[in-house]
């Protein structure tokens, strides 16, 4: 059961967003649904800390807090994926599903492939699809391969983290110098980059971390550069997701492959977070700060106008 509460009759669009608070009977908290502004990943933690210092999150004791939307072990599913067009009818996953559905353990009733799948399972079976599609393997061969695939997934995850650190360092969102990034990262599209570098098993996970946030397609034929992709799918985001409670089986493997937990990793930062009062509350606080920000002559430094018609935008002297 889901119920949406708007901000009331006086609600307004703040910046490029409108916040609607969603109540769900399965959850103990209200979810801020943002129409137009992204949720928060670990890459935004610096910004969140700066907002806190400047008072944009409200007063102590009544702050617009960072809440986690990550999956809770044995809790209700908070992330699901629509499977339409993600698995070929004659591909490895559906071939295995038809003969040995218990091996995949992805649900489905009366032999019908599930139209919606829990993301924790989706990322594995999507990776399995990408690695083995076109191989012409039988259901029996696929049945033997699938139980070992989680280790393959974990190995590729650790390799991606190391690859990203090699080319980007630990700075975000850009590397310290362009020279440390290989030219083919700029010229290769996302799907080919994953395929060419042995990361295609991670496509299902990447779809959530990249495409679901609206940054673009990771599928075959995309023209988006792998460099842009690596800006968003950072080791911090990736490592946090791998160490999520739903990944206990791969956690130690990744830690062993990396040698140690990176210094930049903060386990308390959620993979997907939201502001408890929404972005609209941030803009309200910013508006109040602007109201109080005046020159020595008492004039407002920033004048906010409501219900205006925008006829032209000039940014950096460019119309």
Image: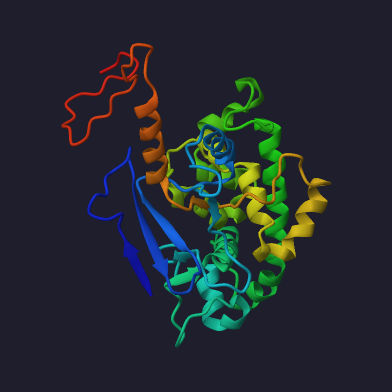
Q: Is residue 296 above or below residue 97?
A: above
Q: Position of residue 182 (x, y in %)?
A: 62, 28
Q: Residue at x 63, y 54 (%)?
A: 241
- Is residue 122 placed above or below 154 in the rendered structure? below
The quadrant of the rendering that contains the N terminus is bottom left
Q: Is residue 145 visible?
A: yes
Q: Quadrant of the C terminus?
A: top left
Left or right: where 292 falls relative to 173: left
- Left or right: where 9 falls relative to 219: left
Q: Where on the picture, by quarter, is residue 283?
A: top left
Query: Residue at coordinates 51% horizontally, 42% vertically from top-left?
Result: 59
104 or 288: nearer the viewer: 288
Front in this rendered view, residue 69 or 218: 69
Q: Nearer the viewer, residue 217 or 192?
A: 217
The residue sitting at the bottom extreme is 110
308 left or right of 247?
A: left
12 relative to 129, above or below: above
Q: Residue at x 67, y 49 (%)?
A: 239
- Residue 27's place in the image compared with 20, above or below, is below
Estimate the x, y position of residue 171 in percent, counting from the top left.
65, 30
Q: Position of residue 107 (x, y in %)?
A: 52, 79
């Amino acid at each position: 059961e889901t119920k949406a509460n708007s901000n009331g009759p006086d609600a307004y669009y703040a910046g490029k967003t409108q916040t609607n608070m969603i109540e769900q009977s399965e959850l103990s908290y209200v979810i801020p649904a943002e129409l137009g502004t992204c949720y928060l990943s670990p890459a935004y933690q610096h910004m969140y800390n700066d907002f806190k210092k400047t008072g944009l999150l409200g007063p102590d004791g009544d702050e617009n807090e960072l809440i986690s939307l990550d999956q809770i072990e044995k809790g209700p599913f908070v992330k699901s994926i629509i499977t339409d067009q993600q698995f070929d009818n004659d591909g490895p996953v559906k071939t295995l599903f038809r003969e040995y559905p218990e091996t995949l353990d992805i649900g489905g009733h009366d032999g019908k492939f599930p139209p919606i799948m829990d993301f924790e399972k989706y990322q594995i079976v999507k990776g399995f699809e990408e690695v083995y599609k076109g191989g012409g393997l039988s259901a029996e061969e696929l049945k033997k391969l699938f139980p070992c695939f989680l280790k393959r997934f974990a190995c590729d995850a650790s390799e991606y983290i190391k690859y990203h650190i090699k080319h980007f360092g630990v700075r975000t969102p850009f590397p310290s110098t362009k020279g440390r990034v290989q030219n083919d990262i700029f010229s290769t599209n996302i799907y080919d980059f994953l395929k060419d570098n042995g990361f295609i098993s991670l496509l299902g996970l990447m779809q959530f971390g990249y495409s679901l946030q609206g940054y673009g397609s990771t599928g075959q034929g995309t023209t988006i550069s792998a460099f842009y992709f690596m800006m968003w799918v950072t080791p911090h985001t990736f490592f946090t997701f791998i160490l999520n409670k739903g990944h206990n089986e791969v956690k130690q493997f990744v830690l062993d492959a990396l040698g140690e937990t990176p210094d930049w990793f903060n386990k308390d930062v959620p993979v997907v977070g939201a502001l408890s009062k929404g972005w609209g509350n941030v803009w309200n606080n910013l508006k109040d700060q602007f109201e109080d920000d005046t020159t020595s002559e008492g004039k407002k430094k920033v004048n906010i106008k409501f219900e205006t018609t925008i006829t032209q935008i000039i940014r950096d002297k460019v119309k």
